[in-house]
């Protein structure tokens, strides 16, 4: 693993913010002024491919990067905020129902977050 890959992985694992590549870039730039955005993208691709980092595609927004420890996501349909939740592990149920041994699944639940709900009722 390259020095940058290691630092990017550390940034992602230390954050609960579901960072975009640009946000990771800005954090890394504080320590390594010479780093360029292309380096971030290259390393993120490698980290996603080798399973060290989870990539979350957001419709109409930038991809987010997240730690791989098993958890699920609830995404606010209004403000786009992503919150971590850990629901019951569905791996066994899906395996039974699909008849295939599954490698992983990606649960994205759309909802309206408390902040946005409060704006509506005010
Ligand atoms: Zn919201
Ligand atoms: Zn997450």
Image (cartoon, rainbow, N blue to C red):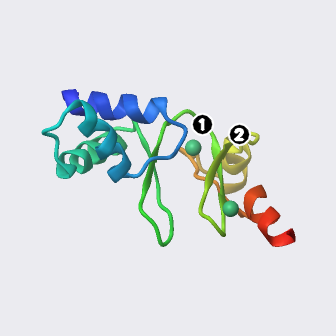
Drawn side of residue 116 relative to residue 67, left or right: right
Query: Quadrant location of residue 12?
Result: top left
Write the residue at 34% across / 51% down: 21
Query: Quadrant location of residue 51?
Result: top left
Residue positioned most to the right: 121
Mark 2 sits on what residue?
Answer: 86
Write the residue at 41% across / 62% down: 62
Q: Position of residue 80 (x, y in %)?
A: 59, 63
Query: Quadrant location of residue 109?
Result: bottom right
Q: Does residue 82 appear in the picture of this structure?
A: yes
Drawn side of residue 52 relative to residue 46, left or right: right
Query: Ligand 2 appears in which quadrant?
Result: top right
At label 1, counting other C-alpha atoms closer than 10 Å, the crowd grade (few under 14, some 14-19, many 20 or more) is: few
Q: Does residue 113 appear in the picture of this structure?
A: no
Q: Position of residue 57 (x, y in %)?
A: 47, 60
Q: Position of residue 20 (x, y in %)?
A: 40, 52
Write the residue at 12% across / 39% down: 34
Up the image or down, 31 lies above or below 34; here it is above
Write the residue at 55% across / 33% down: 69
Q: Helix, strand or loop at disc 1? A: loop
Mark 1 sits on what residue?
Answer: 70
């Amino acid at each position: 693993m390259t020095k940058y890959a290691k630092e990017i992985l550390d940034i992602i694992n230390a954050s609960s913010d579901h960072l975009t590549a640009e946000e990771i870039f800005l954090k890394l730039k504080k320590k390594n002024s010479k780093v360029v955005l292309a380096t971030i993208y290259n390393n993120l691709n490698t980290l996603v491919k080798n399973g060290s980092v989870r990539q979350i595609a957001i419709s109409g927004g930038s991809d987010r990067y997240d730690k791989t420890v098993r958890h699920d996501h609830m995404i606010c349909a209004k403000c786009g905020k992503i919150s971590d939740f850990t629901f019951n592990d569905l791996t066994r149920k899906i395996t039974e129902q699909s008849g295939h041994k599954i490698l992983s699944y990606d649960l994205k639940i759309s909802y309206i977050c408390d902040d946005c709900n409060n704006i509506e009722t005010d």
